[in-house]
Image (cartoon, rainbow, N blue to C red):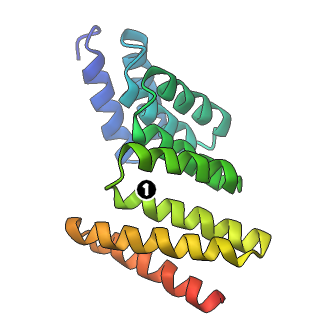
């Protein structure tokens, strides 16, 4: 790869990220961002990489920078919402996941994750009103996913809906 090829470093970083080679991914994503610091996709991938390396603060910083660079980029809001959900900050996760859906309303994975956030909040607060919101989002995810036919996601959604039904 030529040293001035930011996109090449980014693509290589993505490959390493998918293979679980996080240090290699980190090096290539950093190289890409040195050359092209406002590449929103590379910033999101860097945030994912940091999350996999359990570097939550660095993940949050990278994802927030992606949002500052392009404030309507749904994957950045989704990933940041996911980070907050893993930190058990459901309120912040819900706020961010709703923003992701605002910009990409047809993405079933976003509705699924929002449903999970509502469900987590319902369990933590023992508040059934959040269960209803979780069910709505999960049902929407199932409806949208029927177009994509992602059977793995369908199973996850159906399992979560079943878990909610059993929780009542």
| Residue depicted at 30% across the width and 16% down the height | 6
For the point 52% across and 76% down, the residue is 135
From the top left corner, tell me how far across and down residue 91 is, in percent: 68, 53
Q: Quadrant of the C terminus?
A: bottom right
Give the quarter of the image for residue 142. bottom left
Among the 4 quarters of the image, the one containing residue 126: bottom right
Q: Residue 120: percent from the left, percent from the top? A: 66, 67
**Whether residue 14 is situated above or below residue 95 in the rendered picture:** above
Q: Is residue 54 left or right of residue 31?
A: right
Q: For label 1, count other residues whose C-alpha is less than 10 Å away and answer few (under 14), some (14-19) or many (20+).
A: many
Q: In this figure, which residue is indicated by the disc labeled 1?
A: 110
Q: Position of residue 84 (x, y in %)?
A: 64, 48
Which element carries disc 1, helix, strand or loop?
Answer: helix
Residue 134 placement: quadrant? bottom right
- Residue at the far right in the pictured view: 125
Q: Nearer the viewer, residue 26 or 93?
A: 93
Is 18 left, or right, of 26 in this rendering?
left
Q: Is residue 141 above or below residue 68?
A: below
Up/down of 93 relative to 144, above or below? above
Considering the image in quadrants, where does the N terminus appear? top left
Determine the residue positioned at 34% across, 75% down.
154
Position of 133 relative to 71 (above/below): below
Q: Residue 30 versus residue 125: which sits nearer the camera? A: 125
Q: Residue at x 53, y 66 (%)?
A: 115
x and y percent of residue 27 in the render?
Answer: 45, 25
């Amino acid at each position: 790869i030529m040293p001035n090829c930011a996109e090449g470093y980014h693509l290589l970083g993505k490959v390493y990220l998918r293979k679980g080679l996080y240090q290699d991914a980190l090096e290539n994503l950093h190289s890409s961002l040195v050359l092209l610091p406002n590449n929103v996709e590379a910033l999101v991938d860097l945030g994912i990489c940091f999350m996999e390396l359990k570097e939550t603060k660095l993940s949050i910083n990278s994802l927030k920078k992606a949002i500052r660079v392009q404030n309507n980029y749904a994957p950045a809001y989704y990933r940041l919402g996911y980070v907050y959900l893993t930190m058990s900050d459901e309120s912040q996760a819900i706020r961010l996941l709703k923003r992701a859906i605002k910009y990409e309303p047809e993405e079933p994975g976003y509705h699924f994750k929002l449903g999970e956030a509502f469900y987590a909040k319902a369990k933590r607060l023992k508040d059934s009103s959040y269960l209803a919101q979780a069910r709505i989002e999960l049902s929407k995810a199932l409806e949208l996913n029927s177009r994509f036919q992602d059977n793995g996601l369908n199973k996850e959604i159906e399992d979560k809906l079943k878990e909610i039904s059993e929780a009542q």
